Image: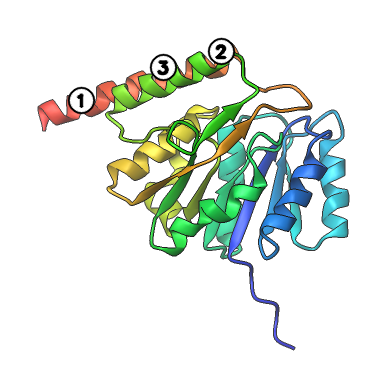
Amino acid sequence: MMPEAKAKALVIIPTYNESQSLSGVVERIRRALPDAEILVVDDASPDGTGDLADRLANEDSRVHVLHRAKKAGLGLAYVTGFDWGLAQDFDTLVELDADGSHQPEQLPQLLAPLDLGAAMAIGTRWIPGGSVRNWPWFRRAISRTGTWFARVSLRSQLRDITSGMRAFRASTLKMIHYETASAHGYGFQVELAWRAERAGLAIAQVPIDFVERAEGKSKMSIGIVLEALWLVTKWGCQARFKRRSG
């Protein structure tokens, strides 16, 4: 009997205390992308998220779980997931939040540009067709300001370089050396997108609807914000220095 062909796409979901939302997100992914596989990377969640993920995996052979010993940052969770997915020969790897803020129903639109040759697709809130729902004005202001600062510092053309809903070709991840990323928090998203942009790769910006989480608590903290601001400033200064001295 021939072994079952590996699904094209692997959707990677980092989790920490997401027991209230994980089941629903997994179910929605299964409906949106029936042939995809799902990898939950749990950071020893004290609320039982890891145990829940194990139960989901036992019920569905297309759901997999990796358990990390402690909470060690979003970026390193994705590095762990990418390592696993590339070792399993997936050719498309997708990032998705566990809290329901990214709409799994929009995953087919996110993946479509890769079928047409794009190296990477970013779910983009701040372009026509994109939206943010249930955010107070100050959350919008912080996000827009952070995106503006990253774009100016890095001279990026990407309208939502901080977005966490994105898809990569396996060859893209290998080319940009994701495993050497210096950011451990949300700056990881900026770093990988900027590396792809500097490499001249084709990046599709796909409009998405971002909806504020209905359950659980945000993992954003002042430390994560400061790390991202510092790294973006450093990368921008280094890039300018290299251009002037080159």
Q: Which kind of residue does numbered mark 1 sit on?
A: Arg
Coloring applied to the structure: rainbow
Residue under label 3: 230
Q: Distance between the residues labelled 2 and 1?
A: 33 Å
Circles 3 and 2: CB atoms closer than 8 Å: no
Q: Quadrant of the C terminus?
A: top left
Q: Residues within 10 Å of mark 1 (few under 14, many from 20)?
A: some
Q: Which kind of residue does numbered mark 2 sit on?
A: Trp
Nearest the eye: 69 or 194: 194
Q: At 54% from the left edge and 40% from the top edge, which residue is drawn?
A: 208
Of labels 2 and 1, the one closer to you: 2
Of labels 3 and 2, the one closer to you: 2
One can see residue 82 in this view: no
Q: In which quarter of the image is the N terminus?
A: bottom right
Callout 3: SS: helix
Callout 2: SS: helix
Residue under label 2: 137
Corner quadrant of residue 230:
top left
Mark carried by residue 240: 1
Give coordinates of residue 54: x percent, y percent.
84, 49
Q: How crowded is mark 2: few (under 14 residues within 10 Å), some or many (20 or more)?
A: few
Q: How far apart are marks 3 and 1 (CA)?
A: 16 Å
Instruction: Give the residue furthest to the bottom.
Output: 1
- For marks 2 and 1, the one nearer the N-term is 2
Q: At 54% from the left edge and 32% from the top edge, which residue is drawn?
A: 131
Circles 3 and 1: CB atoms closer than 8 Å: no
Q: At 75% from the left edge and 61% from the top edge, which residue is drawn?
A: 62
Give coordinates of residue 189: x percent, y percent.
48, 35
Nearest the eye: 74 or 146: 146
Q: In this view, does 153 lie above or below 120?
A: above
Q: Which kind of residue does numbered mark 3 sit on?
A: Trp
